[in-house]
Amino acid sequence: MPTCTRPATDFTPEQLRFPPAAGYTVRADFAGGEISSDLGALVLAAVDRRTGLIDRLSAAINDSRDPRYITHTLRELLTQRVFQIASGYEDGNDANTLRGDPLFKLAADRAPLDHDNLLACGATHSRLEGALRRSDIYRMARALVLQFIAGYPPNSRVRAMLASP
């Protein structure tokens, strides 16, 4: 009669290792320390590196801010806002809580454990959203449509149909 070995019921891995992100080694352990429950931000960052959506959206906006007073680039602001919305944090004031989250910081190419290098607060996002012009919003919508079309193979019927006026 074959014997069946049961897994240990109290087994907890000491550490999980992930591929490097933004030049940092990423490991998950169960000992506490800097804690985040939003690993999805790193997945979104990896997808964005392949698709270039944030760069496309950044290029669509005319940034009229005074460069002397800029702490967060337009790309950083869009990365933070889009990734937070995609992670289920749709309210702008969620940025206040998540601005120090190590995985959101890592996804935005910031040092995850640097407590003096926070992401933007909700008020900064509110000012950005209020400063967008109708032409910026039109170009962003166009960028989203072009991103959607780019997802189809070059010679597909769907892409030809979507690209025609």
Image (tube, grey):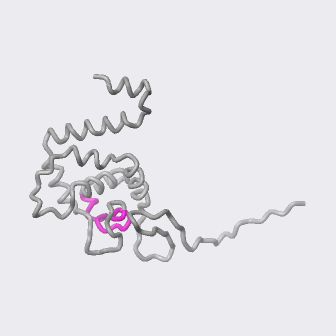
**Residue 42 inside the magenta-drawn segment:** no
Q: Position of residue 74 (x, y in %)?
A: 21, 54
Image quadrant holding the N terminus, namely bottom right
Q: Does residue 141 appear to the left or right of 135 in the view shown? A: right
Pick the front one: 119 or 68: 68
| Residue 105 figure quarter | bottom left
Up-down: is 154 above or below 109? Answer: above
Residue at x 38%, y 52% (from the top left corner): 49
Up-down: is 88 above or below 164? Answer: below
Q: Position of residue 27 (x, y in %)?
A: 48, 69
Pick the front one: 108 or 86: 108
Residue at x 21%, y 61% (from the top left corner): 72
Q: Does residue 37 appear to the left or right of 11 in the view shown? A: left
Q: Position of residue 63 (x, y in %)?
A: 15, 51
Which residue of the protein is positioned furthest toward the right in this rendering?
Answer: 1
Image quadrant holding the C terminus, namely top left
Report how many numbered discs are placed on residues in the image: 0
Q: Does residue 2 appear to the left or right of 120 in the view shown? A: right
Q: Position of residue 140 (x, y in %)?
A: 24, 41
Q: Does residue 69 appear to the left or right of 153 in the view shown? A: left
**Residue 105 inside the magenta-drawn segment:** yes
Residue at x 40%, y 48% (from the top left corner): 50
Pick the front one: 108 or 129: 108
Up-down: is 25 above or below 131? Answer: below
> What's drawn in magenta, residue-wise?
93-106
Residue at x 15%, y 38% (from the top left corner): 135
| Residue 37 figure quarter | bottom left
Which residue of the protein is positioned furthest toward the front in this rendering?
Answer: 155
Pick the front one: 26 or 97: 26
Which is the main secondary structure of the residues drawn in magenta? helix
